[in-house]
Amino acid sequence: MKQYLNFLQHILENGKEKNDRTGTGTISVFGYQFRCDLRDGFPLLTTKKVHLKSIIHELLWFIKGDTNIKYLVDNNVRIWNEWPYKKFCASEEYRGEAMDEFINRIKEDAAFSCKWGDLGPVYGRQWRQFWGRERTVDQLATVIDLIKTEPDSRRLIVSSWHPVYIDEMALPPCHLLFQFYVRDNTLSCQLYQRSADAFLGVPFNIASYSLLTMMVAQVAGLEAGEFVHTFGDAHIYSNHLEPVKLQLSRTPRSLPRMQIIRQVASIEDFRYEDFLLTDYHPYPAIRAKVSV
């Protein structure tokens, strides 16, 4: 996907060194945008293999309104493990347990999972139970209903940013607001991402919100159109520079195709087995360390 490689190159050429919360250090730019037409193929990177299973399960987890990593752990998805583990390691209960031991306890001990697996009121909670003025709002359901009944509305928005609860979240939302747009029987989506780990996180975000657009389009009886990705602080971590250079040396291959193989009536009805990716021929994966 050439748009993504151009994004990485833009950061390298125009970014400045900037400190960050994790202490790793970054090269950062402020403000960038690219577009993907979902009719041209599914925007899953081919210049490195991306773990689609994790993307699908995380998205289903968001849609469920879940905030505990147990669902992800039970499905062998590791992308959120570091944050609750870091919190556990700082607690008085920590006795030197390694990550694997911590994850096994999340799987096997319900009380432990309830206490240490929850991330606070992160994405799923805000999508499905946004709290305010003594009531909750199911933002996702409300927006889908508006798409069906008032497709020209300019209020087709879901926000994960709730200032009241930021301090209670394991990680404040990075991809914090998305807006749908209907025209000519097609549904497009624009995501605003305040903070973007360009090498590790952004490939997941592109695929996740593209798939969400396809899912909402099916439920609403529309075709999927464009995914527009807009960034605030877009950065490459200093320990990702060599992996980024390797990725930039690779020539993008044809995009794969994503099919939703079962018609569903409600966004909650989707299952992992409903998605079929074909013609995906990526280069090998490129490993890098996540900054927590």
Image: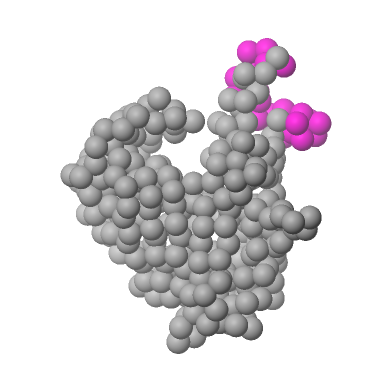
- Give above or below for 233 relative to 94: below
Q: Is residue 100 in view from this perspective?
A: no
Residue found farthest to the top: 95
Q: From the top left corner, tell me how far across and down residue 149 is, in percent.
A: 64, 83
204 sits left or right of 6 in the view:
right
Q: Quadrant of the N terminus?
A: bottom left
Considering depth in this image, is 128 or 85 the residue closer to the camera? 128
Q: Is residue 142 in view from this perspective?
A: yes
Q: From the top left corner, tell me how far across and down residue 159 is, in percent.
A: 57, 57
- Main SS, magenta region, reads helix
Residue at 30% across / 40% down in the picture?
28
Residue 184 occupies quadrant: bottom left
Residue at 46% across / 73% down in the picture?
188
136 sits left or right of 287 in the view:
right
Residue at 65% across / 53% down in the picture?
126
Considering depth in this image, is 258 or 161 the residue closer to the camera? 161
Span highlighted in magenta in the image: 93-115
Structure colour scheme: one colour
Considering depth in this image, is 28 or 254 the residue closer to the camera? 28
Q: From the top left corner, tell me how far across and down residue 194 is, in percent.
A: 44, 48
46 sits left or right of 175 in the view:
left
